[in-house]
Image (spheres, coloured by chain):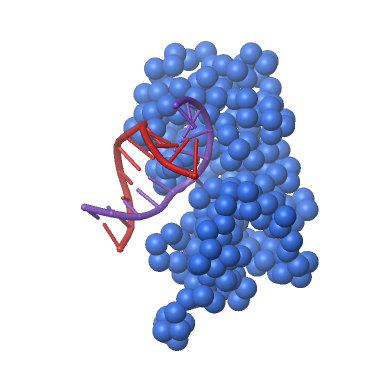
Chain colours: A blue, B red, C purple
Amino acid sequence: MVTLARGKRRGFQRRVLAWYAVNGRDLPWRKTRDPYAILICEILSHQTQIARVVPVYETLLSRYPTVQSMARAPLETVTAITDPLGYKIRGRWLHAAALQVADRGGAFPRTIDGLRELAGVGRYTAGAMMSFAYRRDAPMLDTNIARVLSRHFDGRNQRPGQARLWQLAAAVIPKGKAYLMNQGLMDVGALICRARSPLCDVCPLRRSCAFRRGSARRSLKRRD
DNA sequence: AACCCGGGGGT
DNA sequence: ACCCCAGGGTT
């Protein structure tokens, strides 16, 4: 069980949201709540850098504006667009999921468990759809959020398991603001708390971060 | 839990 | 060369 002191939690949330309001990336799927569009962007984003996802996302949506139009399309026309990104199974997943939704009359599932029955939709993608498309307070854990939470709460000498990370991901969501928090955490992870050389000096969470506290004295003394 | 899938980016 | 990238499915 994860327990975060109320004050610590509030501070963490406030810093991420304030930072995101100013520094958040301007990504095309942040303009929509269409679960179909969200599904496309999330499937395409699996283990794939966002810059490479954007053009494929645009092509796919302009070619198949609705889930029914993708369901009607031959599989090969979809995979031809998605295959260049690698993990070619995702084109098949996307098309299969479109068929599943079309069979439901074009209505996407509204629950985590329902979403996870769609091809290629796991715990992460279901959480993303719940918070991005439906604006529900659902946690999600991707490589960015996992890294931010792990570093901030457990520092550099511990390896938190998936169970703890999911609990933390849920614990840091302010009521009614999962969308902003999840997007914000992903951007902090992608732009500041990077895997390689994190920009701790300009991180909104630097004052409370266990990773930074655990860093070598020498690097702390460095000034820009 | 370990393993597989994958092309492309950054260092 | 090596590591990493908005994970999911299978074994």
In which quadrant of the rendered view does residue A210 lie? bottom right
Up the image or down, A31 lies above or below A215; here it is above
The location of residue A147, given as percent across then percent down, is 52, 57
Whole-percent x and y of residue C11? 44, 26
- Image position of A190 (left or right of A124): left
Does the image show residue A38? no
Q: Where A180 sits versus A210, above or below?
A: above
Q: Position of residue A98 (x, y in %)?
A: 56, 21
- Foreground: A13 or C2? C2
Q: Identify the residue at image location x=61%, y=53%.
A: A165
Q: Residue at x 39, y 62 (%)?
A: A196
Which residue shows up at 40% across the image and 19% down it? A77
Q: How many marks?
A: 0
Position in image of residue A43 (x %, y %) = 51, 34
Q: A27 above or below A55?
A: below
Up-down: is A86 above or below A16?
A: above
Which quadrant does the N terminus of chain A fall into?
Answer: bottom right
The image quarter containing residue A109 is top right
